[in-house]
Image: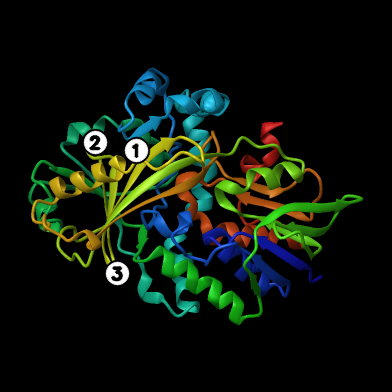
Amino acid sequence: MTRDVAVIGAGITGAATALELLRDGHQVTILEPAPPGGEQAASYGNAGWFSSMSVIPPSGPGLWRKVPGFVLDPLGPLAIRWRYLPKVLPWLLRYLAAGWTEERVLRVAQALRPLLQDSPVLHAALAAEAGVPELVEHRGLINAYTSRTAFEGEAMGWRIRRQVGITWTELEGAALRKAEPDLDPAYTFAVLIGEAGRCLDPGRYVAALVALAQHRGAVLRQAAATGLRIEGGRLRAVTLADGSALACDAAVICAGARSKALAAIAGDPVPLETERGYHVMLRGVTQGPRHSMSLSAAKMVVNPMRDGLRAAGQVEIAGFDAAPNWKRAEILRDHLLKSFPGLPRDLPADRVAFWMGHRPSMPDGLPCLGPSHATPDVIHAFGHGHVGLVAGPRTGRLVAQLLAGREPEIPIAAFSPARFR
């Protein structure tokens, strides 16, 4: 049975979902108020990692002890603006609870592993279909540490990764220097996760996927969805910001950090929060890392991209409306220059770009993926937090399976929006 489906959002999840729905023969309209892949989107500004090993939730045992520091230090790698603390406190308590014990962290990892596994292979297939295969690379990602002791300080996370089937190769001393000759010698130990991959231009990649969907018959409508018209347990239309309505008999909510209001209309008041992330881009720079890597001492990811070198990271809890704190991006720049001493220090201002965007984050580190409470015609597909890019292709496949009434290819009970009821 073919349906008229509104895909609300044109980030990586919306783009992948639209393509999978088109394969099933549905009529697809993509609703997105701004150009797909544009700077307003989290899919544009992320680190570009297909990090299939990112199964550990952001929270962990003992993190609660650091909360006062998160509030007092506005420039730390995880900061909470004190004025926003009363509003975010319920979400924060759930966030801390999700990683309270190793057993809870393991449950999250076991749920995420099937969602993320084989992601670089799925991305490579989509990129080839869209005519941009050069934007996807599959030769592993590096996590670098200042010492083996520093690596062992994260033993729980790596132990759990091994438990769910993730393997890696150790690089130490001369082997690390050979792999990354320009890296600060303070980094002496690393692990290479061979199954992972990266994207060399996430914004262009997402735009290419949406263009492919349009070529295959999807309609892209520059409009913001503001509501759902549900009558007798069935979806009749999606209402739009201009006062009009798009008639449809199914919809997918994949509007990233702005999905919360629509989810509530669909009967699921979920605790979605925005984790604001930053990046700095050194345009035209080709020196520095040979691989994409995470630098533990700097708490950031560094990714050589098509147009230069990107450093991304930082978590800031401050809501949608607070102004960016560009000092956070400057910190990333300074860490980048310190980590790769051979990088140019005198780039003109137009070659150093700062960005801030909104990760859509659930407190337990798991996305919302499944039918809404109000009607099976509305599917939730948002809240992926730090794994939105890597999870995009399989999420799209799962949405298509749910709308068709097929058995999902992986277990998704842990992602149910009903878990917060």
Q: Position of residue 317 (x, y in %)?
A: 45, 34
> Label 1 amino acid?
Trp
Q: Position of residue 294 (x, y in %)?
A: 27, 47
Between label 3 and label 1, give the one nearer the viewer. Answer: 3
In the image, taking residue 400 as reference, residue 132 lies left or right, namely left
> Label 3 amino acid?
Arg
How far is mark 3 from mark 2, CA to CA? Answer: 30 Å
Q: Is residue 406 visible?
A: no
In the image, taking residue 155 as reference, residue 402 lies left or right, namely right
Residue holding disc 3: 306
Q: Is residue 110 above or below residue 7?
A: above
Q: Residue at x 42, y 39 (%)?
A: 163
Q: Earlier in the sequence, mark 3 or mark 1?
A: 1
Q: Is residue 58 visible?
A: yes
Instruction: Give the secondary structure at mark 3.
Output: loop
Mark 1 touches mark 2? (CB < 8 Å): yes
Q: Residue furthest right?
A: 232
How far is mark 1 from mark 2, CA to CA? Answer: 9 Å
Residue holding disc 1: 158
Residue holding disc 2: 151
Instruction: Give the secondary structure at mark 2.
Output: helix
Quadrant of the rendered image containing residue 292: bottom left
Q: Quadrant of the C terminus?
A: top right
> Label 2 amino acid?
Phe
